[in-house]
Image (spheres, rainbow, N blue to C red):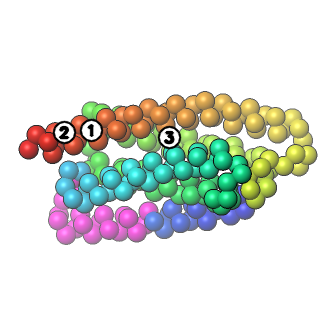
């Protein structure tokens, strides 16, 4: 079980800093930063890279039980931090316009973040060691069995939505590069 919520506090702090920078840019330019200009692109690129790290690094570490890349609890905290901050940056990148494929990708982003919050709640119901291994006998077997079943069901929903999100995001990025860069 996670002993602290440091990743949540750091995500809130990062969100406050990012919001401050966004508000400053909005104030100085007297407009909402367009998605297609330098600041908007920077938000989108950094946010998307953070989302890619969310999706890949934790999954890779989870499958390499014998690896000495740090504790699983750290990687879960990293996953949660990047899974909150990255999508927030991508949301700001949208310039509050949600049409077309980019709008669909934004909707999938919101769904995956909400799903991640639900998954974190389910995950914390299962007692674990600091390394992320389940503790047997710490809770009644029926409660543990129910939590495992919920976590398995959650995975069957969360992972395909994540795949759909990244497919739509890569198509959006490809289209943006083609139409904004290659056709000019």
Q: Earlier in the sequence, mark 3 or mark 1?
A: 3
> Does the residue at mark 2 contact the one at mark 3 (Cβ under 8 Å)?
no
Secondary structure, mark 3, is helix
Q: Residues within 10 Å of mark 1 (few under 14, many from 20)?
A: few
The location of residue 123, given as percent across then percent down, is 70, 46
Q: Residues within 10 Å of mark 3 (few under 14, many from 20)?
A: many
Residue labelled with disc 3: 112
> Does the residue at mark 2 contact the one at mark 1 (Cβ under 8 Å)?
yes
Cα separation between marks 2 and 1: 6 Å
In the figure, is residue 86 to the left or right of 32? right
The answer to whether residue 19 is visible is: yes
Q: Quadrant of the N terminus?
A: bottom right
Judge by depth and name the residue closer to the eye, 118 or 160: 160
User: Which residue shows up at 67% across the image and 54% down it?
Assistant: 67
Residue 87 lies, with reference to residue 146, above or below; the image says below
The location of residue 113, given as percent across then percent down, is 50, 45
Secondary structure, mark 1, is helix
Q: Which residues are magenta?
A: 15-34
Q: Quadrant of residue 101?
A: top left
Q: Earlier in the sequence, mark 2 or mark 3?
A: 3
User: Which residue shows up at 56% across the image and 53% down it?
Assistant: 79
Residue labelled with disc 2: 178
In the figure, is residue 110 to the left or right of 124? left
Residue labelled with disc 1: 174
The location of residue 144, given as percent across then percent down, is 82, 39
The answer to whether residue 99 is visible is: no
Q: Residues within 10 Å of mark 2 (few under 14, many from 20)?
A: few
């Amino acid at each position: 079980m996670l002993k602290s919520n440091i990743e949540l506090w750091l995500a809130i702090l990062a969100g406050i800093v990012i919001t401050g920078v966004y508000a400053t840019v909005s104030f100085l330019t007297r407009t909402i930063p367009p998605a297609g200009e330098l600041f908007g692109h920077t938000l989108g690129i950094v946010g998307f890279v953070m989302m890619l790290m969310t999706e890949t690094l934790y999954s890779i570490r989870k499958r390499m039980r014998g690896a000495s890349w740090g504790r699983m609890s750290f990687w879960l905290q990293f996953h949660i931090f990047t899974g909150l901050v990255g999508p927030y940056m991508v949301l700001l990148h949208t310039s509050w316009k949600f049409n077309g494929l980019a709008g669909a990708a934004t909707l999938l982003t919101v769904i995956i973040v909400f799903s991640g919050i639900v998954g974190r709640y389910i995950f914390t119901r299962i007692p674990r060691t600091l390394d992320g291994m389940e503790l047997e006998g710490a809770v009644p077997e029926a409660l543990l069995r129910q939590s495992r079943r919920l976590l398995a069901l959650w995975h069957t929903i969360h992972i395909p939505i994540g795949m759909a999100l990244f497919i739509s995001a890569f198509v959006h990025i490809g289209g943006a590069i083609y139409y904004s860069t290659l056709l000019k």
